Amino acid sequence: MVVARPALGTLNHTALTLEALERRDLAVHGVILGTWPDDPGVLEHGNRAALGTLRPLLGVLPERAADLPPVTFRAASAHWLSGAWS
């Protein structure tokens, strides 16, 4: 999987990353969006939709998820990676 950011430039960065991994015969099963903002705008929503055309979108992690205690992160990650956020 590839973790991408939802901000400006992510489509190019993610496409280049996927291309580099494919050239090395590394399988990529999908993309996870990290640092999803509390109040996403048109750009973030558009990037989320476009990234889903490159590979399956496996999940969305909210901003500051890495700051959570590990037990809280583990408990919430099932929801973040379930598709319930879509």
Image (spheres, grey):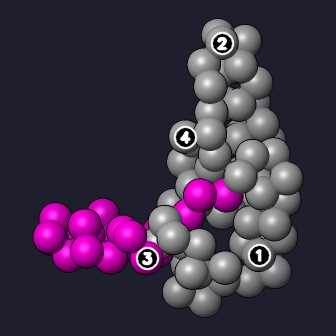
Q: What mark, if any, has residue 79 been given in the picture?
A: 3
Amino acid at circle 2: Asp
- Quarter of the picture containing the C terminus is bottom right
Location of mark 2 (residue): 25
Give the mark nearer the N terminus: 2 vs 4.
Answer: 4
Nearer to us: label 1 or label 4 = 4
Give the mark nearer the N terminus: 2 vs 3.
Answer: 2
- Residue 2 image point, x, y percent: 57, 41
- Residue 23 image point, x, y percent: 72, 12
Q: Is residue 4 magenta?
A: no
Residue drawn at (77%, 55%) of the image: 51
Asked whether, in this view, residue 8 is left or right of residue 82, the answer is: right
The magenta stretch is 57-79
Location of mark 4 (residue): 1
Give the mark nearer the N terminus: 3 vs 1.
Answer: 1
Q: What mark, if any, has residue 7 been given in the picture?
A: none
Give the mark nearer the N terminus: 2 vs 1.
Answer: 2
Residue drawn at (62%, 39%) of the image: 29
Location of mark 1 (residue): 45
